Image (tube, helix red, strand yellow):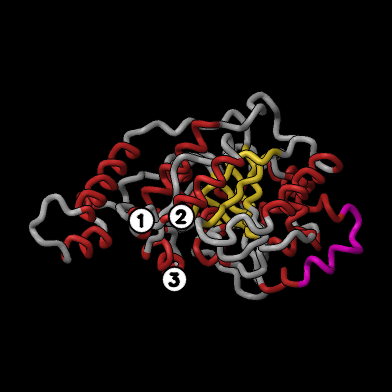
Amino acid sequence: MSVHDHGVGSTSYDATADNVDGAVSRETEDAFAGLNDDAGSPLANELIETERKRRALESADFPRPTRTRIFAVSNQKGGVGKTTTSVNLAAALAQRGANVLVIDADPQGNASTALGVDHREGTPSIYDVLLDDTPMAKVAQRSKEIPSLWCIPATIDLAGADIELVSVVRREFRLHDALHELLEGPGKNLDYIFIDCPPSLGLLTLNAMVVAHEVLIPIQCEYYALEGLTQLIKTVEMVRKHLNKQLELSTIVLTMYDARTNLAREVANEVRSHFPQQTLEQTIPRSVRVSEAPSYGRTVITHDPHSSGAVAYLAVAKEIAERGAPAQQNRGTA
């Protein structure tokens, strides 16, 4: 399957397709089942507010970028919601009409799983792009649920890529060269590209940062949240100085946020004090629906669009779309 064969940019997604008759979320049903008749219940108020926000977002405008925005989604600390953020932001933006590509650069292949694309051993993947010069258009797979969403999968072969790339010519620019070949041809209508990086700062992450315009860092609102962030920022600065002058740390998303705990609020305040411009207003709450969606080969955006997690990611997508690329609005894709 190739991008060219199916015409990236020729389709859009009906945001109501999965919400027949405005079906209420299972999360909402489960919560209300446990409520009594107390109209002032905090849980009831929270559910009402989530539904109000969802309806407002459904009618909101998500401005399309004037050029392709390329994000490296990175955090060397595992379990912070990096892959979850990558796929759900991509799905939210694609659902609102944008043409979006997710590049799964993590050997675990979790982004491929969440998007429901084939990534069994031997499947044409990002490994073939990086090591064998296979064109991206030949390995991209279209989402079965959102026609304007694409994924370049990762297979188990990618596990050894960091070592194999060491001896390859232009090893830091393999992804850069392949992606720009795509953008100059069948992928020229792409609005967003999200590169899901592995939880390390090896050559796979370096390749992502060399081609990206922006770095998006998910940070969990828990103890040790900022651990390792200093090294990641140093890596971004090093790449900007020596390999990619256009790279910007543009976006920080606070994940696994629980407003009921002092710790979550303290972490959020600390992150915002250090990165006031980059940290988004919308936080991502803990949500069972977000966690279970990948087991169905889906993102929470299509799995349970009324859930608090889906609404939060849709709000983050809107914020990213409205903020635009920092100081890069008129720059081309090169």
Q: Magenta region's main secondary structure?
A: helix
Q: Amino acid at mark 3?
A: Ser
> Which residues, given as a range, are shown in magenta?
160-170
Marks 1 and 2, Cα distance to the nearest angstrom?
A: 8 Å
Q: Is residue 81 left or right of residue 96?
A: right
Judging by the rendered image, the residue that carries numbered circle 3 is: 295
Q: Is residue 242 left or right of residue 78?
A: right
Q: Residue drawn at (50%, 45%), measured in percent from left and top?
A: 269
Residue 316, x across and y down, in percent: 46, 43
* Residue 288 seen by the camera: yes
Pointers 1 and 2 in contact (C-beta within 8 Å): yes
Q: Is 22 colored magenta in this rendering?
A: no
Which numbered disc, 3 or 1, marks the residue that appears first in the sequence?
A: 1
* Callout 3: SS: helix
Q: Quadrant of the N terminus?
A: bottom right
Q: Amino acid at mark 1?
A: Arg
Residue 298 location, quadrant: bottom left
Residue 238, x across and y down, in percent: 82, 45
Judging by the rendered image, the residue that carries numbered circle 2 is: 264
Which label is found at residue 260? 1
Pointers 3 and 2 in contact (C-beta within 8 Å): no
Q: Residue drawn at (48%, 53%), measured in percent from left and top?
A: 88
